[in-house]
Amino acid sequence: MVGLAVLDPVAFSLGPIQVHWYGLLIGSGILLGLWLAMREAKRLGIDPEKILDMMIWVIPFAILGARLYYVLFEWENYASRPLEIFAVWKGGLAIHGGLIAALLAGYFFVKKYELRFLVLADIVAPSIILGQAIGRWGNFMNQEAHGGPVTRAFLEGLHLPNWIIEQMNIQGIYYHPTFLYESLWNVVGFGLLLLLRWVNPKRGEIFFSYFIWYSLGRFFIEGLRTDSLTFTGPDWLANLLQVLWSPMNILFDPGAMANGNIRIAQLISVCSILLAIVIIIWRRQKGLATQSYKEVEKVSASMQ
C-alpha cells in the first residue's frame, strides 16, 4: 500500500505568518466550549456575560500557565535557545499547567466580582473536557504526544482511516495514537458530564467529576507515552504508580521514559482523583452540599 503524505502542520499562510493547525484546533476547542457554557448559563437563568467575562480572564492565564509548566519541566531543552519558549505553535502546552493557572484566575475572578465559584465551575466543566478532546488533534497534526512503537497491523486492527495511520508513521516507525485515545476518552467524559446535569447532583460535583474522569483516563494513557514530563522521585512512589498502572500490562507495554522514574501527569492524576473524591465526601458530611446543580434561583439574582 502506498502511504499517504504526512499532513502539513501549517493550515495556511498570511504572507510571512504561518497559521498552524495546532493553534486553530486549540482555539476552536476554546470557542466551542465558551459557546456551550454561555448557552448553559442562560438556560439556568444566569447572565451568560459573566461566563464570557470570566473566560477573558481565564483563557490567557491558562495558555500562559500551560506553556510555563511545560518549559519549567523541559528547561534543559530551552536553556540554550530561550527564543523557542515563545514558539507555542510547535507544541508544548501542558494541560495540567493550564488547569492550575485557570483555576487560580477563575478563583480571583469570582472573588473580585463576588460570584460563586462552584456554580460557574459546574457550568464550564463539560466545556473544558470537550475543548481538551478537540485540542488533542493539534498534537496529532504536530506528530507529538504519541506512545511507543507499534506495527501498522496493530493500527489497522483499530480500524483507523489511513490518514491517521500514516500520520502515526514518524521517520518510518508507527506509534501508538495516544492523542486519539485521550480525545475519545474526553468525548465520552463530555457525554457523561452532560448526563450528570440531567441527574442533577449537588453543586460542585459536576466539576469534581470532571477531574475524576479526566484524571483516570490521563493516568493510564500517559503510561503509554514516550514524551512524558518526568522527574526522579523515591522508588516507593515510582513502584506504587507502576502497580496502579499494571492492569494495562495485559494489553500494552509502557512507553519509555527518557529520564526520571515518575511521570508527573500520572502523579497529578492520582492526586486529583483522590482530592476530588475526598472533597465530595467532605462537603456532603459537613452539610455544605445543600443545593443541587439546577437550584439556581437563589444565586441568579446575585449574578445578574
Image: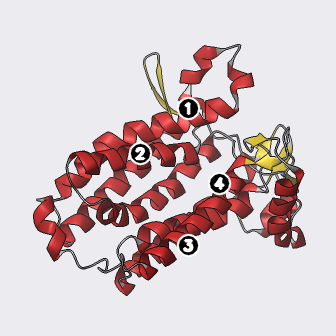
Q: Which mark is residue 68?
A: 1
Q: Which residue is mark 4?
A: 268
Residue 276: tell me if it is visible: yes
Secondary structure beneath disc 2?
A: helix
Residue 25, image x, y percentages: 48, 45
Residue 220, image x, y percentages: 73, 63
* Comparing labels 3 and 1, the label whose residue is closer to the camera: 3
Q: CB of mark 3 within 8 Å of CB of mark 2? A: no
Q: Residue type at mark 1?
A: Leu
Residue 33, image x, y percentages: 37, 56
Distance Cα–Cα, label 1 vs label 2? 15 Å
Residue 184, quarter of the rendered image: bottom right
Whether residue 98 is situated above or below residue 287 in the rendered picture: above
Q: Which residue is mark 3?
A: 277
First in sequence: mark 4 vs mark 1: 1
Q: Which residue is mark 2?
A: 104
First in sequence: mark 3 vs mark 2: 2
First in sequence: mark 4 vs mark 2: 2
